[in-house]
Image (cartoon, rainbow, N blue to C red):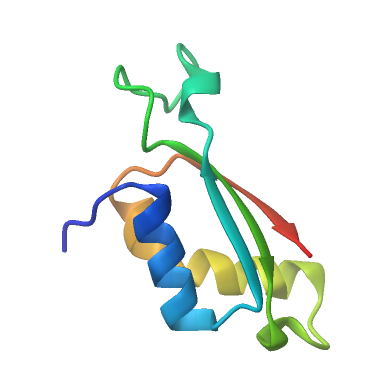
Amino acid sequence: MSVILSAQAMEAALRERLAPSQLEVIDESYQHAGHVGANDSGVGTHFRVRIACAAFDGKSRVARHRLVYDALQDFIDQGAHAIAIEVL
């Protein structure tokens, strides 16, 4: 399955899978120009996710991050190189 590597598409996937109470997805790709995993377009490779979610209650930091990575697996498979996760 081909997905669009955009902050908006990632946000939609996270909302659908995790129903977060707070969510912000930021494309920071432009800050990584010339780095490993970056592309020439400056978009779609490096993202920051700030998220609060009831599904995280009682889970370890690693388990919380795994939930986010699982929700974004299609994006990772299509070339999202780095996803920084901030659990709120």
Residue 44 locus on image (x, y percent):
37, 38
Residue 39 locus on image (x, y percent):
33, 23
Q: Is residue 71 above or below residue 31?
A: below
Q: Quadrant of residue 2?
A: bottom left
Of all residues, the one furthest to the left in this rendering is 1
In the shown orientation, is residue 86 left or right of residue 81?
A: right
Q: Quadrant of residue 40?
A: top left
Q: How many marks?
A: 0
At x 16% / y 64%, what residue is drawn? 1
Q: Nearer the viewer, residue 14 or 24?
A: 24
In the shown orientation, is residue 19 left or right of residue 3?
A: right
Residue 26 locus on image (x, y percent):
54, 44
Of all residues, the one furthest to the top in this rendering is 34
Q: Quadrant of residue 43?
A: top left
Residue 17 locus on image (x, y percent):
46, 81
Q: Is residue 10 above or below residue 70?
A: above
Q: Is residue 70 above or below residue 48?
A: below
In the shown orientation, is residue 5 left or right of residue 18?
A: left
At x 32% / y 54%, what residue is drawn? 77
At x 42% / y 80%, what residue is drawn? 16
